[in-house]
Image (cartoon, rainbow, N blue to C red):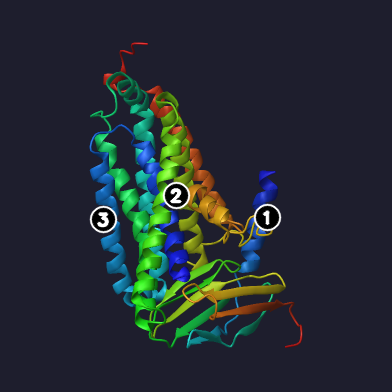
Amino acid sequence: MRAVVGAVLFGSWLAGSAWAAEPVQLVLKDNRFSPGQVQVRAGERFRIEVQNQDATPAEFESSDLKVEKIVAPGGKITVMAGPLKPGTYAFFDDYHPDSAKGTIVAVENGAEK
Amino acid sequence: MLATLIIVFREVFEAGLIVGIVLAATEGVARRGAWVAAGVGAGVAGAMLLAAFAGALSDAFAGAGQEVFNAAILIVATVMLAWHQLWMAAHGREMAREMEAMGRAVAIGQRSLFAMAVVVATAVLREGAEVALFLYGVAAASQEGAGAMLAGGVAGLGLGALAAYLLYRGLVAIPVHRLFTVTGWLIALLAAGMAGQAAAILAGADLIPSWGYQLWDTSWLLPDTSLPGRALHALVGYSDRPMGVQLVAYVVVLGALLIGARLARRAPSPVFRHRPL
């Protein structure tokens, strides 16, 4: 049992160690994210850069991506996410969850953009 | 107003669960109220300071300042909980006996109060910084009147504090000779959860290996974002999609505390040697 768990852990660690070089760029302005939807490749770790162009603080958060980070007014943060299974993952600004929200769509390798 | 209420309640609730357990775990120790209050005060002051320097903190450690800081204070809290746990294992029975014999305020247990005040301070600091930033944002945007915002904040604070109080009252309804066994388990789980959370934060920022990014997914059953999910997250470190390193840290800390408590109990302190039963 322990050996199986160990093998699974190690395997997924190896699989997760490669991530895309190009970060996903998100801009927060007027309490909205642009772009509101981003496509990434499934199975790869990737960076998300969030730039806050508003005069108020934001908290970039996604329970789907297990990410939670404060973005100061006019500030920029980088978080890591993935590797993701194909599917749709929601993110939002925890301080303005009604307007500032978006999705990341993970697609299989080689899928058309 | 409702948005303010919800976010303030959520953060106060999460910190409040920890304060509730700390209050129950220190039940009967003289002057614990002052220590816990000092912990809350230090946490609030720290939260405001942290909120003021949020931008600078983000840029520290090559952009991983928030992650390093959050993980560090979780680790400090874990160490303090562990210290209290082992101390209680050695002295808990003695304390419970003295409480039963002499009523509430007992002098022993003073030394573990500092550790528990630190735990309270870190919990209030973590959740309080988010509240302070949020309120600053609402005030700056002035989308709603300052009065409504204040009312929402106060209501959220009151409801969160009420939840903490109810947890505390529920725990101290347990008879004294069982109380410290129950709070001992709660503190061990709390410490394990914090250690797991710290590991997940560091692995999330690629500072340590993750050993698997998603061991399982129970978000369909009990999402982290739901109120029960949040409560379990704060209390026992529940995560709907845990990382490998998170589970390892959890199991290691929980195991170390359970074994350590057993060993501490077997080696009684000098005061404890003559055991009148």
In the image, residue A83 above or below residue B256:
below
**For the residue marked with disc 1, what is the amino acid?**
Leu
Where is residue A45? Give x, y as percent. Answer: 60, 73
Percent coordinates x, y for residue B257 in the rendering? 45, 38
Query: Circles 2 and 1: CB distance less than 8 Å?
Result: no
Q: Are marks 3 and 2 in contact (CB under 8 Å)?
A: no
Q: Earlier in the sequence, mark 2 or mark 1?
A: 2
Residue at numbered disc 2: B163
Label 1: chain? B
Q: Identify which amino acid the numbered label 2 is placed on.
A: Ala
Q: Residue furthest top?
A: B277
A66 or A47, nearer to the observer: A66
Q: Which residue is mark 1?
A: B221
In the rendered image, which quarter contains the N terminus of chain B?
A: bottom left
For marks 3 and 2, give the CA distance.
Answer: 19 Å
Residues beneath discs 2 and 1 located on the same chain: yes
Indicate the position of residue A82 as horizontal and vertical percent values: 61, 71
Location of the C terminus of chain B (image quadrant) = top left
